[in-house]
Amino acid sequence: MTDRLYYHDSFLYEFDARVVDVVQRDGRAAIVLDRTAFYPTSGGQVFDTGKLVLPDKTEVAVVEVTDHEDGNVLHFTAEPVPEGAVVHGFIDATRRLDHIQQHTGQHVLSAAFIGLFNMPTISFHMGDESCTIDLETAALTSAQAQKVERLANEVIAEDRPVSIRFVPLEEARQLGLRKLPPKQTGDLRLIDIKDFDLCACGGTHVRATGQIGCIFVRKTEKVKQGVRVEFVCGLRAVTTARQDYSTLTETAGLLSAHIHELPQQVRKLLDDAKTASKMQHKLLEEIAQLEAERMLSAITSAPRVLTAVFAERDAVFIKLLAQKLTAAKNDVVALLASGSGQTTLVFAQSPGMKSNMGQQLKDAMAQLGGRGGGSAELAQGGLPAGTVDLSRIEALLKEIGAKLQS
Ligand SMILES: [Zn+2]
């Protein structure tokens, strides 16, 4: 069984060891050391990376570390390392410190949720950018989340000592732990944040809460099992806050506003956009109406078959126009196309006429290589922009029109 050096010192970044076994796992070779400071993924905390230096000074990267049920720690390396080799291990200290800050921060946060609102943590996940805990609760208000965040940061500012001790399970049961592991053999490893939290955990932790730096709750959301709280701690919180602030500052610059005025400014912009969009639609309807009147005035013989291609207009316009044309008279067939955005064809006829626009459009689309359909009275189809020349479409519309006219 591997001697886990990180159990006793989370800040041990170098150690000597010997390769006692080489095993195959999922098609990859993994080495077992007699002792290790590398943390394997478990309990929500992700693995350490680093390197092993061999006696001939060869360096081999440690790319993943996992826990094996036999009690050994498996080190997956970039190159093979022979059994019996004596190695000097180096842990990636930046990555480890980040994990220590997130992980111990989670202890503080979970204890604060219990202490203030009796909301137990049911799971913990450490991601590349942020971490989450799932709370067993039906709801969490933002005022509650802020209160917890405040308490957690006060505990950090108080720089409370964090100590590790090993006690038998029976003794641990008397201590009122926040969390007991589901199955346990041998002594329990307890992490004690002085006068604030006591729980069983195999992870790596700070020596005193001040080393967590800070805890920043970013988001809360309802999930199936309760409420998910996203947070970041320590230097990661600084990085995240810097990114957030830069985004806000850039956005505020675009609006020539102070960042605190952004919600109000964005609300105003959205309102303006809504008004402008309504106005635009109204104008488009008016133009469609005028265009319909112009087109109808040019033709008097029934049925009035009208074909037109609008290179600068889009699908919305020709649909509006088709509606106006077929509503104005009871003997209109409109075969229209637009060239702005996706090339679109709209076929429509006045209610009660005998042709089938859906079928006509389907046939036209089959010739042009597009897709579409609709009812006997109104049908629509699209072609990817630029795939078919508008003059070809115009010729086809005229051809269909001539057949319908006869
Ligand atoms: Zn822990």
Image (cartoon, helix red, strand yellow):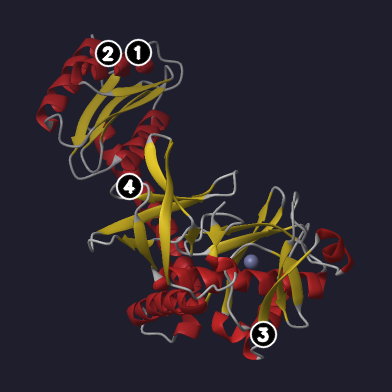
Residue behind mark 2? 363
Question: Cβ(mark 3) to ligand 1 < 8 Å?
Answer: no
User: Is residue 277 visible in this depiction of the protein?
Assistant: yes
Q: Which of marks 3 and 2 precedes in the sequence?
A: 3
Left/right placement of residue 78 relative to residue 308 reads: right
Which of 374 and 68 lies nearest the eye of the viewer?
Answer: 68
Helix, strand or loop for disc 1 = helix
State yes or no: discs 2 and 4 in contact (Cβ < 8 Å).
Answer: no
In the rendered view, tell whether residue 347 sits above or below residue 43.
above
Q: x, y (%) of residue 120?
A: 77, 62
Residue behind mark 1? 359
In space, the residues marked 1 and 3 are separated at their CA atoms by 79 Å
- Please name the amino acid that badge 2 sits on: Asp
> What crowding class fits label 2: few (fewer than 14 Cα within 10 Å), some (14-19), or many (20 or more)?
some
Question: Cβ(mark 1) to ligand 1 < 8 Å?
Answer: no
Helix, strand or loop for disc 4 = loop
User: Is residue 213 visible in this depiction of the protein?
Assistant: no
In space, the residues marked 2 and 3 are separated at their CA atoms by 79 Å
> What crowding class fits label 4: few (fewer than 14 Cα within 10 Å), some (14-19), or many (20 or more)?
few
- Residue 161, numbered label: 3
> What crowding class fits label 3: few (fewer than 14 Cα within 10 Å), some (14-19), or many (20 or more)?
some
Q: Which of marks 4 and 2 precedes in the sequence?
A: 4
Helix, strand or loop for disc 3 = loop
Residue behind mark 4? 82
- Please name the amino acid that badge 4 sits on: Pro
State yes or no: discs 2 and 3 in contact (Cβ < 8 Å).
Answer: no
